[in-house]
Image (cartoon, grey):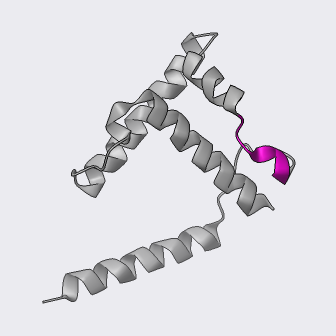
Amino acid sequence: MEHASARNVIKRTFELLKARWTILRSPAFYSIKVQNCIIMACCLLHNYIQQEMNDDLIESLLTDEGSGDEEFGEYLGTIDSYLIWNTWRDEIAKSMYNEWRDIP
């Protein structure tokens, strides 16, 4: 249930970012590092806009359409990070990188 709620939060977040920032609407031909920076910059700008503006037209438009979270119950705002999951994720990433690097 929490996984489904978290997935919906992430999906809604990217819908909101894509509605606001044109660069996120089409396939990116930038490096992964640059793509991460673009997404982070869009998130930071979005948060700044939310702080400074009382009425956000884009968010209100998406809210009016409904986010689909109703069927999953309570809204999940944050997800705690766990060391064991972070370690596992990092090990998978290192393994994938090492396999990629060793390919002739």
* Above or below, comparing residue 86 to residue 61 in the picture: below
For the N terminus, the image quarter is bottom right
Report the residue at 59% width, 16% height from top: 56
Task: Report if residue 69 lies within the magenta region.
Answer: yes
* 23 shown above or below 86: above
Foreground pick, 13 / 41? 13
Note whether residue 52 is visible: yes
Residue 8 in the image, given as x and y percentages of width and height: 67, 50
Compared across the picture, whether 94 is left or right of 104 comes to right
Quarter holding the C terminus is bottom left
Q: Position of residue 52 (x, y in %)?
A: 55, 11
For the image, the number of numbered tags is 0
Instruction: Indicate the quadrant where residue 24 lies.
Output: top left
Most extreme residue toward the left, as rendered? 104
Q: Which residue shows up at 74% across the image and 53% down it?
A: 5
Decide which of 60, 102 is in the foreground and name it: 60
Viewer-proximal residue among 12 and 79: 12
Residue 21 drawn above or below residue 36: above
Is any atom of residue 80 visible in this view? no
- Residue at the front extreme? 65
Q: Nearer the viewer, residue 89 or 72?
A: 72
Question: What segment is highlighted magenta in the picture?
Answer: 66-72
Residue shown at 46%/72% (left/top)?
90
Q: Is residue 101 magenta?
A: no
Instruction: Identify the residue at horizontal 51%, vertical 21% (top origin).
Output: 48
Q: Position of residue 97 (x, y in %)?
A: 31, 77
Image position of 30 (left or right of 55): left
> Could you say which quadrant of the image residue 57 lies in?
top right
Task: Give residue 16's position: percent from left, percent from top.
Answer: 54, 34
Q: Residue furthest right?
A: 73
